[in-house]
Every structure is written in C-alpha cells, then in structure tokens.
C-alpha cells in the first residue's frame, strides 16, 4: 500500500484515516502504543516527526509475543 506523508506521523495518520480499525491497534491517545515498532528503511523510529520521502519504506510491527493480563499457573 502506498501512503504519502511528510513525516512518520503523517503517514500513520493517513493509514488510520484509510483504515480506522488500524488506529485501535497501533495508537493510544494519539501516540504509538508501547510495543508497536515502526521502522524507516529498516531502522527503528521513535520520533513521529521524522521526515520521510516517496522512496522510503515505513514498516509497522505489532508485538509478536503476548500474554494474559492476569496469568494463572497451570497445574496438571
């Protein structure tokens, strides 16, 4: 999918505008959720004001490990 924007934040905002459910996954109160990783050309990005160009590749990685918010030990 090709999304244009001058900054990482603008790209993410356009993505969420086109696909609103994505916002629930990657954003919390307008900021990236804690465990979401955004890369620009393979480099982790923390600053949403980082500039991007048409040639750049922005990737979003959700957490790959999960867990239960209230883990309980399993006994067999």
Image (cartoon, helix red, strand yellow):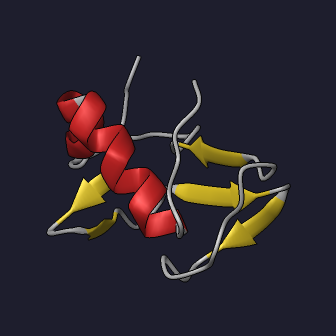
Query: How far from the left and from the top, in percent, is residue 10?
Result: 41, 62
In the rendered image, the vertical position of residue 76 relative to residue 3, given as above or below = above
Q: Quadrant of the C terminus?
A: top left
Q: How many marks?
A: 0
33 sits left or right of 64 in the view: left
Q: Residue at x 52, y 39 (%)?
A: 3
Q: Residue at x 85, y 55 (%)?
A: 42
What residue is drawn where x is 66% and y is 45%? 59
**Is 57 in front, or is 54?**
54
The image quarter containing residue 40 is: bottom right
Q: Is residue 10 left or right of residue 54?
A: left
Residue 53 position, x and y percent, is 71, 60
**Which percent across, then down, holds residue 31?**
29, 71
Judged left or right of residue 42, residue 38 is: left
Along the line of sight, which residue is nearer the eye, 33 or 9? 9
Q: Is 7 placed left or right of 17 in the picture?
A: right
Eyeballing the image, is 35 above or below 18? below
Query: In the orientation shown, which residue stands out farthest toward the left?
Result: 29
In which quarter of the view is residue 27 placed? bottom left
Would residue 30 be seen by someone viewing this image from the given angle? yes
Of residue 65 and residue 60, the one placed in the foreground of this image is 60
Question: Which quarter of the figure is the N terminus placed in?
Answer: top right
Q: Name which quarter of the figure residue 41 lies in.
A: bottom right
Does residue 26 appear in this view? Answer: no
Q: Nearer the viewer, residue 6 or 49?
A: 6
Q: Residue at horizontal 81%, vertical 49%?
A: 55
Q: Is residue 37 above or below residue 72?
A: below
């Amino acid at each position: 999918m090709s999304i244009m924007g001058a900054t990482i934040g603008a790209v993410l905002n356009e993505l969420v505008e086109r696909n609103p459910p994505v916002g629930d996954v990657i954003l919390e109160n307008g900021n990236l959720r804690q465990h979401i990783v955004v890369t620009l050309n393979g480099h982790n990005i923390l600053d949403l004001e980082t500039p991007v160009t048409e040639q750049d590749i922005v990737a979003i990685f959700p957490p790959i490990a999960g867990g239960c918010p209230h883990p309980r030990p399993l006994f067999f």
